[in-house]
């Protein structure tokens, strides 16, 4: 299984991958090193990239489409994964996969934790910094296994 990596730039993988529905789901880490966050689905037999979702960026990169139903009014809008960050900071903003990835077969949904944005010092990155864990609360993006972001929850 080939997983694209940029270890020389600080990108690592510290969480265990999850295998479900014929796919291997894996997220990167290294938010403190200024990497761009992602969660990836690979074909379990070939290792071929099926999809990659970022936690910050344009709606198309974050995989936000018409099915996205945000609970919080502050999560409603277009391209918030860019406009809620200082200019271009979302490109190196951290918010990488944190902790675990789990699959709910009943709802055909993925849940995973999102870590801190980078840099850690919030004074250096004003704004709401969607969709990273800005306020040290767990952020649980909910994805269907078919690559559609449906919700984002804070706990």
Image (cartoon, helix red, strand yellow):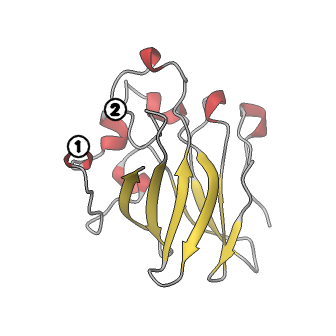
Q: Which quadrant holds the N terminus?
A: bottom right
Label 2: state its secondary structure. loop
Residue positioned 62% across, 83% down in the render:
21
Locate residue 90: give its quadrant: top left
The foreground one among 8 and 130 is 130
Locate residue 127: give its quadrant: top left
- The answer to whether residue 51 is above or below residue 85 is below
> How far across and down, in percent of the image, does residue 45 sit?
76, 80
Q: Earlier in the sequence, mark 2 or mark 1?
A: 1
- The answer to whether residue 91 is above or below residue 141 is above
* Residue 74's disc number: 1
The foreground one among 12 and 112 is 112
- The residue sitting at the front extreme is 155
> How far across and down, in percent of the image, does residue 52 sit?
55, 60
> How far across and down, in percent of the image, does residue 3 sit?
74, 58
> How far across and down, in percent of the image, does residue 75 sit?
27, 47
Q: Are marks 2 and 1 in contact (CB under 8 Å)?
A: yes
Residue, disc 2 = 128
Label 1: state its secondary structure. helix
Residue positioned 54% across, 35% down in the render:
116
Residue positioned 70% across, 39% down in the render:
11
- The residue sitting at the top extreme is 123
How many other residues sit within 10 Å of disc 2, few (<14), some (14-19) or many (≥20)? Answer: some
């Amino acid at each position: 299984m080939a997983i694209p990596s940029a270890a020389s730039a600080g990108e690592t993988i510290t969480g265990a991958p999850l295998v479900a529905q014929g796919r291997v789901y894996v997220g990167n880490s290294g938010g403190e090193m200024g990497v761009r966050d992602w969660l990836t689905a690979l074909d379990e037999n070939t290792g071929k990239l099926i999809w990659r979702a970022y936690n910050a960026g344009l709606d198309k990169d974050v995989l936000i489409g018409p099915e996205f139903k945000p609970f919080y009014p502050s999560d409603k809008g277009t391209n918030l994964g860019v406009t809620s960050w200082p200019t271009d900071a979302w490109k190196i903003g951290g918010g990488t996969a944190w902790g675990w990835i789990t699959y709910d077969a009943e709802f055909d949904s993925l849940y995973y934790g999102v870590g801190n944005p980078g840099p850690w010092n919030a004074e250096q990155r004003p704004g709401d910094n969607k969709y990273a864990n800005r306020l040290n609360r767990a952020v649980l993006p909910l994805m269907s296994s078919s690559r559609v972001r449906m919700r984002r929850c804070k706990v």
